[in-house]
Every structure is written in C-alpha cells, then in structure tokens.
Amino acid sequence: MGTFSIPLQVSGPSRARFVKVEALVDTGASHTLLPRDVLVELGIAVMERVPFQLADERTVEYEVGEARLRLDGRERTTLVIFGPPGAMPLLGATTLELFNMAVDPVRRRLVPVAGLLK
C-alpha cells in the first residue's frame, strides 16, 4: 500500500492553541501517537498507562490522554498515546473511525465514509 502523511492540528483541553503536525497514516496502529513534548506543551494530562503490542511482538506500556484534533475541517476528541519526545506522529485507526475517514491506498489520501450502525 505504501505510506503517506497528512497534516492535522492538535490542542489541549482549553482549545486555546492548536499545533500543526504531520502524521503518518497508520491503520495498523489502534490509536494516535504524538510526541510527549507536544502533548505536555499543550497541557494534555496523562489518564493512565496502557499496554501496546509493537510490530516486533514486544508489549510495552505507554501513557495515554485525551486531545482535541482537527482533521479535514472537523474537530474530535480522541485518545492519544504519549510517544517519546520527537517521535513520528501516527494517525491510528480509532481516530480515523471517529472522523469517519478511510484510506484510499491508490491515491494515498483519506476519504470520507459513512458510519456503520449495522
């Protein structure tokens, strides 16, 4: 499929300031990961530590919190993982679903999709 990045904006609970980041679209990641330094700067609080399985099958724990994201002209609150400082931002599957977006692998872009109530 290849990979691609998209611009998105992230804010803390006050929504006073949004920071723009380029995030790698990663449908293999369940949640969105952002660098710890960005999340701390925005005042996003740690809610808990959660285990995550990595591609090499190791299980590690990361802190998670809630952030406000802007994507495609819309805003949502989503769970975010506190990644290492300077980590590559990842846009994960849960956040894509919250925005009703899917991956178009041929054109390397996100496309709107209908939500499911089946």
Image (tube, helix red, strand yellow):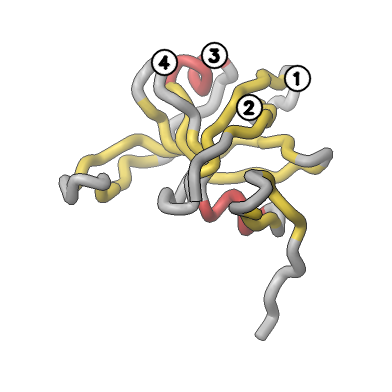
Q: Residue at x 67, y 20 (%)?
A: 20
Residue under the point 78% across and 41% down:
72
- Can residue 23 be seen from the camera position used here? yes
- Give the residue number, with chain letter if any, for mark 3: 41
Amino acid carrying label 4: it is Gly
Residue 65 visible? The answer is no
Q: Is residue 94 above or below residue 66?
A: below
Mark 3 vs 1, N-terminal side: 1
Q: Is residue 39 above or below residue 103?
A: above
Q: Label 4 vs label 1: CA separation?
A: 23 Å
| Residue depicted at x 44% and y 25% | 88
Quickly name the residue at label 2.
Answer: 12
User: Marks 2/1: CA distance?
Assistant: 8 Å
The residue that appears at 63% across and 27% down in the rendered structure is: 12
Marks 4 and 1 in Cβ contact (< 8 Å): no
Question: Which residue is farthest bottom?
Answer: 118
Q: Secondary structure at mark 2?
A: loop
Residue type, numbered disc 3: Glu
Q: CA distance from mark 4 to mark 3?
A: 13 Å
Q: Are marks 3 and 1 in contact (CB under 8 Å)?
A: no
Mark sitting on residue 86: 4
Viewer-proximal residue, 1 or 5? 1
Q: Are marks 2 and 1 in contact (CB under 8 Å)?
A: yes
Q: Secondary structure at mark 4?
A: loop
> Is the C terminus in the top left, top right, bottom left or bottom right quadrant?
bottom right
Check disc 1 and give the amino acid type: Ala
Spatial CA span between label 2 and label 3: 9 Å
Observer-side mark, 4 or 1, equals: 4
Is disc 3 surrounded by few (<14), some (14 to 19) or many (20+) residues within 10 Å? few
| Near-viewer residue (28 or 52) | 28
| Residue of label 1 | 16
Q: Examine the image and state in which quarter residue 64 appears.
A: top left
